[in-house]
């Protein structure tokens, strides 16, 4: 048998790849290359659904694998929807007034120091009823200031 003029590689290197195998290998290489440049975890429109397929939340398209989704993101439909979304957000930003910081008046309190207190239990001599007497002393309070 003559292997010299056979299509493919050297003798002993295995059979030449079929067109189907070449396509699978090419798609895998392209997917790996795209995943190096694009992080799908940070893509806000990328979602994996309960069936195991991938969805573009912006365009509402379904994709069987990540490579298909990555190809979709470079396509015209996705780019048009991105431009439409950007224009819509820009229009909404024009109508929203710039939020101003609310001015909150700071309550000013007169410093009266740490109060001293004394609690005394007493019995009313006329009725015999128990009572508590609270005596509070504000040492740093100036005259005329009611705490």
Image (cartoon, rainbow, N blue to C red):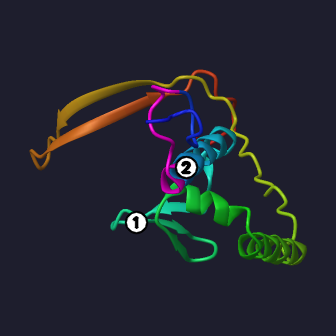
In this view, the residue farthest toward the right is 94
The x and y percentages for residue 121 are 20, 32
Q: Earlier in the sequence, mark 1 or mark 2?
A: 2
Q: In the structure shown, which secondary structural element does the residue marked by tag 1 occupy?
A: loop
Marks 1 and 2, how far apart in space?
30 Å
Residue assigned mark 2:
22
Residue assigned mark 1:
49
Q: Is residue 80 above or below residue 131?
A: below
Q: In the depicted view, which residue is nearer to us: 19 or 129?
A: 19
Q: In the depicted view, which residue is nearer to us: 102 or 44?
A: 44
Q: In the structure shown, which secondary structural element does the residue marked by tag 2 occupy?
A: helix
The disc placed on residue 78 is none
Q: Is the magenta stretch mostly helix, strand or loop?
A: loop
* The quarter of the displayed image where residue 81 is located: bottom right
Asked whether, in this view, residue 47 is left or right of residue 124, the answer is: right
Work out which quarter of the rendered image holds the N terminus and state it.
top left
Q: Tell me whether circle 1 and circle 2 mark residues in contact (CB < 8 Å).
A: no
* The quarter of the displayed image where residue 136 is located: top left
Q: In this view, does 76 lie above or below 40?
A: below
The x and y percentages for residue 127 are 11, 50
Q: Dot 1: few (<14), some (14–19), or many (≥20) neighbours within 10 Å?
A: few
- Magenta-drawn segment: 11-22
- In the rendered image, residue 73 lying in the magenta stretch gets the answer no
The x and y percentages for residue 49 are 40, 66
């Amino acid at each position: 048998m003559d292997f010299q003029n056979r299509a493919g590689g050297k003798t002993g290197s295995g059979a030449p790849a079929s067109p189907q195998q070449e396509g699978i290998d090419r798609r895998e290489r392209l997917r790996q290359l795209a995943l190096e440049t694009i992080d799908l975890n940070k893509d806000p429109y990328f979602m994996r659904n309960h069936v195991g397929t991938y969805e573009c939340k912006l365009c509402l398209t379904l994709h069987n694998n990540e490579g298909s989704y990555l190809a979709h993101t470079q396509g015209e439909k996705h780019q048009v929807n991105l431009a439409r979304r950007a224009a819509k957000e820009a229009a909404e930003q024009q109508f929203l007034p710039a939020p101003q910081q609310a001015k909150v008046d700071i309550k000013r309190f007169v410093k009266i120091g740490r109060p001293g207190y004394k609690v005394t239990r007493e019995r009313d001599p006329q009725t015999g009823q128990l009572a508590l007497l609270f005596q509070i002393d504000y040492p740093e309070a100036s005259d005329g200031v009611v705490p």
